[in-house]
Image (tube, helix red, strand yellow):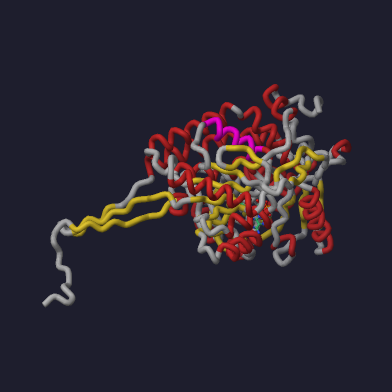
Amino acid sequence: MSTRLMDVNDAGKEAISSISDIQLYIDGVFVHADSKETFENISPFTNEPINRVASGDTEDIDQAVKAARKAFKGEWGNLKVKERLAYIYRIADLIDEHIDEIAPLESYDTGLPLSQTKKMVARSAHNFRFYAEMVSSRLVGDVYQVDDEFLNYTIHKPVGIAGLITPWNAPFMLETWKIAPALATGNTVILKPAEWSPLTANRLAEIIDKAGLPDGVFNVVHGYGEKAGAALVAHPDVELISFTGETTTGSEIMKNGADSLKRFSMELGGKSPIIVFDDADLDRALDAATWGIFSFNGERCTANSRLYLHESVADTFVERLKERVQNIIVGDPMREETQVGPLIHKKHYNNVKGYLELAKEEGCEVISGHIPEDMSRGNFIAPTILLNAHNNMRVIQEEIFGPVIAVMTFKEEEEVIELANDVRYGLAGYVWTKDMQRGHRVAQAVDSGMLWVNSQNVRDLRTPFGGSKHSGIGREGGYYAFEFYTEVQIIHVALKDHHIPQFGKK
Ligand code: NAD
């Protein structure tokens, strides 16, 4: 382990060497699952066990719901907003203090390169700070004045217990992206982290514990999706479910939550296009396309997995992309220089490998970069380009969720808009052109929740985040999250004695 961790500082080394089996966090206490069952957490880099994780189920979800309800009705629910937000700021500060431990743990658990997890963890602290600021400045109601007769106004109330179900691709960042607005608006939380990436969720529970939040406000129940996740979704006392994950899982969850009339936020899969016109700044477009698909090991929901090149620039662009792919540094996620690490799990690796086989069968030329020889125990897929692709292939229609970019060409603007929209997903899109009229025109014509023009996925947390079509329902981010995490109540007040019909009066 020592040579593996040469780029990790002492705090990170200490965090990794002290990894132990992890428990659930319910009502302010770390506990075994009621069944005492555990599951194995496997290293993406070696495929050896890292630790064992308590495997929660219905009984544990039940306990967490009771604790969350008690906190919601009790101490947490009675706090002044300022007092509540002081806790949120404290969580942000504590995350910042522990970046050097959390980022290496995340890389160790997920295979995401260290240089990238450091940024994700810093962003996670920002998620809390941002939502504390948003609640104080933007959680405001409307007033509707009706002459001098009525004053109608809205207020926002927390909904109750928020069930948060998260994926493994950027675990700590995505968990905090949900927890921060849920807590800042006054709800209590039960987090069900992805079973392939449990480590940092427990580090977060330790941090929240240290921040001193009342017991039961924040709970973590690890476990399989079809057990702990399904129990959370079906529980009649959980008011809302914010889910990020695969489209098919989202659809299953909505069915299972129908009986208890859950409120849902759905952040689902993607197959996002990047369109490069002949007048684009090709150097920058190349940087953006390469980073957009190969960062996060290609396991990024907003990855630009479909590259549409104007035919007049396609040959040169592809040559330069091939060169990039050969030079990308694939390796140990714990090394600072690594750009692409191993995929999260053998199952996911086999899935992506299967798509590369399929690409050949469907007629693509498959061009791959290099994996160093000593990486053979990990779930490594070299950065890969699919050439000769077209829209009616499965590799173009389905989300691969690995370091694989498919290249296609186009002649006309209308043609490329049609190609870009010809998938069931609509999460993100990217357009590169110096003609800003065309930039706006194409941006508006692409069916996607988010569209970047001459930019590579630079986020502005105030803006809505989410997908259209099969990529999602609802928006998180900015004050858009308030629609989901709060109940809006309208209060009608009469300022005068207005006419009231007098039924039955003699
Ligand atoms: P997944 O759907 O397999 O699992 C996500 C979570 O759902 C896990 O915690 C899992 O345990 C849980 N789960 C599974 N079945 C469940 C059930 N029946 N009931 C309740 N919970 C259940 O997704 P994944 O493989 O972890 O993540 C990858 C997917 O996430 C990709 O499709 C990616 O595009 C998507 N994603 C989307 C966004 C976005 O913002 N739109 C962001 C990140 C990832």
Is 210 colored magenta in this rendering?
yes
Q: Where is residue 56 in the image (x, y as percent from the top left)?
A: 67, 49
Count up the numbered dots: 0
- Relative to 323, say whether 497 is above or below: below
Q: Quadrant of residue 76?
A: top left
The residue located at (42%, 44%) in the rendering is 77
Identify the magenta region.
200-211
Frontmost residue, 119 versus 405: 119
Most distant residue in the left direction:
506
Residue 448 located left or right of residue 370: left
Q: Where is residue 308 in the image (x, y as percent from the top left)?
A: 66, 56
In the rendered image, is residue 416 in sight? no
Residue 17 located left or right of residue 479: right
Residue 270 located left or right of residue 483: right
- Relative to 148, say whether 1 is above or below: above
Frontmost residue, 280 versus 53: 53
The residue located at (40%, 35%) in the rendering is 83
- Relative to 353, say whether 112 is above or below: above
Is 355 colored magenta in this rendering?
no
Frontmost residue, 59 versus 140: 59
The kind of secondary structure the magenta stretch mainly shows is helix
